[in-house]
Image (cartoon, rainbow, N blue to C red):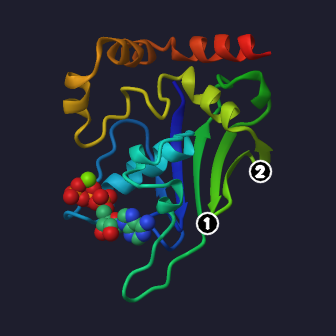
Amino acid sequence: MIQFTKLRLSGFKSFVDPTELLIAPGMTGVVGPNGCGKSNLVEALRWVMGETSAKQMRGGEMDDVIFGGTSHRPARNLAEVTVVLDNAARTAPALFNDAAEIEVTRRIERGDGSDYRFNGKPVRARDVQLLFADAATGARSTAMVSQGRVGALINAKPSQRRSLLEEAAGIGGLYTRRHEAELR
Ligand code: ATP
Ligand code: MG
């Protein structure tokens, strides 16, 4: 299990100014009035873990995650989210051998797509998805239950439900790797 310790956002949805949240071990609650950005926070986490569907981000296209402006503030052209992971126990893949902390960053520029970094070094989207696939905390795992998702689970086709259960069981990463191996 990978412990998330920090979440940093800048220009992401309603979080236009740089914001850092500390995530302590155990349960974290986020409270606030309707529309204050609670779901946006969860989406930021899912996005930095490699979500590729704009629909899952409640947008029409991925650029919609970038702060779109308000009556008081102009829109931005950049959004960046970083999640910091505790790797003190060195449970992350060998790629992170000596790193006590792993910073996973995703950045999107309007009209130009997004890219990822591990501790500042550019990596592929696949590397990010694989890092999280093993932890049963992937962007699509049942560990991330968003508003309205319970209903979607109930209405899912058996095959979709199966893949959700497989990911919850922590074997989603194996399928992702098998697919990678078949592509090579
Ligand atoms: P609820 O309690 O109703 O579920 P919430 O706290 O989950 O509310 P969110 O859905 O996270 O609220 O936040 C919605 C707010 O985020 C809205 O005010 C919306 O205008 C704003 N928002 C979403 N996307 C963007 C964007 N790209 N740019 C600026 N603001 C955005
Ligand atoms: Mg919400």
> How far, Cα to Cα, is label 1 from label 2?
21 Å
Q: Check the image and report above or below for 169 versus 90.
A: above
Q: Amino acid at mark 1?
A: Arg
Mark number for residue 155? none
Q: Is mark 2 within 8 Å of ligand 1?
A: no
Task: Identify the residue at image location x=60%, y=31%.
Answer: 129
State the image coordinates of residue 24 (x, y, percent, origin top left).
Answer: 43, 44
The image quadrant in which ligand 1 is located: bottom left
Q: Amino acid at mark 2?
A: Gly
The residue nearer to you, when weighing 143 against 23, is 143
Whichever of labels 1 and 2 marks the residue nearer the N terminus, that label is 1
Q: Quadrant of residue 98?
A: top right
State the image coordinates of residue 79 (x, y, percent, origin top left).
Answer: 58, 63
Res 79 seen here: yes
Q: Quadrant of residue 125?
A: top right
| Furthest-bottom residue in this view | 72
Q: Check the image and report above or below for 63 versus 154.
A: below
The residue nearer to you, when weighing 63 against 143, is 63
State the image coordinates of residue 170 (x, y, percent, origin top left).
Answer: 48, 14
Task: Identify the residue at image location x=50%, y=30%.
Answer: 138
The residue nearer to you, when weighing 103 against 130, is 130
Quadrant of the drawing holding the C terminus: top right
Mark number for residue 110? 1
Q: Quadrant of residue 177?
A: top right
Secondary structure of residue under mark 2: loop
Task: Identify the residue at image location x=27%, y=22%.
Answer: 156
Q: Residues within 10 Å of mark 2 (few under 14, many from 20)?
A: few
State the image coordinates of residue 12 (x, y, percent, origin top left).
Answer: 50, 63
On the image, numbered disc 2 is attached to which residue? Answer: 120
Secondary structure of residue under mark 1: loop
Res 14 seen here: no
Q: Nearer the viewer, mark 1 or mark 2?
A: 1
